[in-house]
Amino acid sequence: MPSLPMYFPAAFSLSQALQCANLVEAAYDQYDQWLQQDKPRKPSDFNWQPPSMSGWGFSAPIWSILSEPKYINESEPFGFAVSDPNGDVYLVFRGTESAQDWVDDLEAKQSTYPWKADVGLVHDGFLKLYTSLRDLALQAVDSLKPAGNFWVCGHSLGCALSSLAVLDLQLTWPGQAIQHYNLASPRVVDPSFAAYYNGLDVPTYRIVNDSDLVPEVPPGVTGKWVYQHLGQAVTFTASYTSVEDDHSLASCYLYALNNPEAPMNG
């Protein structure tokens, strides 16, 4: 049975969603280049070749540096910032390489958001990872001398990072417009944080395949913790043959955005 067409909210920009998704794909390519270079541990030893995009300027890679092996990614390039020819800046994060990691291993404890009082609680593992790369992420943005709008984007785990980064951008560069496009986001925060975030009036579009398991974790009620999604869902349905295929950025989410009238391939 063919899939139903995607429905987009009035302020949603399909062209910007595609731009964000393509940049996130470049963040995955950055990770692949790191693997091909035998995983250099020092950023200075990693020779990243960003995509060739006329008039665009890329920051250095943003690295996560975690010393505790139980967390998902450790001392790896996780994305970048980039400025477009109009001076707008994109902050871009990739996710994990296996959707099954979320299903099997996700920890759901919550911790207080540390950089602004009385905001609420966030997923402890996501917060630790974001903390490990936060300084480099803000330095990457600052290196581009931002003067225009901000676009924040991610896929999977990268959506958790992009969600936490939005507050930092607003606090560090007040008055500059921010929009947030993410793909396949897990739940990241408690209801108090979600209410605070949604009250910031940062347009946040959470693009989600209804058949993807990752956006369903952690469950809304997980033990004593309560989780909530951020922003406005932009949904489609594409049921493939595996958890990984339903979650894939390239073959599921990018395909849907490139074919919104029939977002499932096949």
Image (cartoon, grey):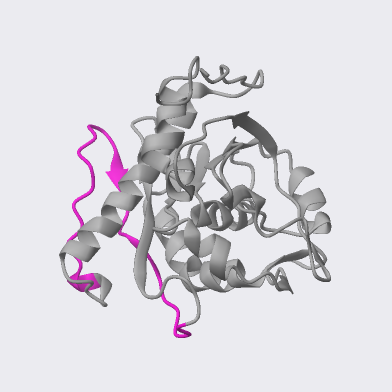
**Relative horizontal placement of residue 7, taking residue 18 as reference (left or right):** right
Q: Is 66 included in the stretch rendered in magenta?
A: yes
Expressed as whole percent of the image width and height from the top left, the position of residue 51 reads 23, 42
- Dividing the image into 4 quarters, which one contains the C terminus? top left
In the image, residue 10 above or below residue 93 = above
Q: Quadrant of residue 115?
A: bottom right
In the image, residue 70 above or below residue 240 = below
Q: What is the total number of numbered labels drawn onto the structure image?
A: 0
Q: Residue at x 67, y 54 (%)?
A: 187
Expressed as whole percent of the image width and height from the top left, the position of residue 129 reads 52, 70
Expressed as whole percent of the image width and height from the top left, the position of residue 235 reads 62, 31
Q: Report the magenta residues as a range.
A: 44-69
Q: Is residue 21 visible?
A: yes
Q: Is most of the magenta stretch helix, strand or loop?
A: loop
Q: Residue at x 52, y 19 (%)?
A: 1
Expressed as whole percent of the image width and height from the top left, the position of residue 63 reads 37, 67
